[in-house]
Amino acid sequence: MSHTITIRLDKELAVWLEEAAAKTGVSQGQVVREQLEKARARGGQQTFMRLAGSIKGRPKNLSTRKGFSKT
């Protein structure tokens, strides 16, 4: 490995990382590298965003809902 980074995790994420590493039998660093590789393979896109605006019968722009419009 040629680059080292240091990150701060909140308690909940640190516990998850520790448990994921223990469950899979790999180091915490390897778990982080695998997750970064998955993110890179997705092209940095959030997969859940593909569903944005796909619910029928709802306004296309939520800012047009009554009570939320500034006009």
Image (cartoon, helix red, strand yellow):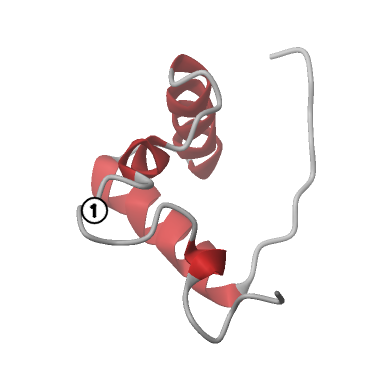
Q: Which residue is mark 1?
A: 55
Q: Left or right: 9 with respect to 26? A: right
> Mark 1: which secondary structure?
loop
Residue 63 point in image, percent of width and height: 56, 67
Residue farthest front in this picture: 71
Number of numbered discs on residues: 1
Q: Nearer the viewer, residue 65 or 10?
A: 65
What's under tag 1, amino acid-wise? Ile
Q: Residue at x 48, y 64 (%)?
A: 62
Q: Is residue 49 left or right of residue 25?
A: right
Residue at 36% in and 47% down: 53
The image quadrant that residue 68 belongs to is bottom right
- Percent position of residue 69, x then y: 62, 75
Q: Nearer the viewer, residue 61 or 33?
A: 61
Which quarter shows the C terminus?
A: bottom right
> Where is residue 21 drawn, in percent x and y?
38, 47
- Decide if residue 29 is on the left or right side of residue 26: right
Q: How busy is the neighbourhood of tag 1: few (under 14 within 10 Å), some, or many (20 plus)?
A: few
Q: Is residue 26 above or below residue 11?
A: above
Which residue occupies 79% across, 36% down?
5
Placement of the N terminus among the 4 image quadrants:
top right
User: Going by the image, does 1 lie left or right of 21?
Assistant: right
Out of 10 and 57, give the one closest to the viewer. 57
Residue at 46 percent of width and 55 percent of height: 17
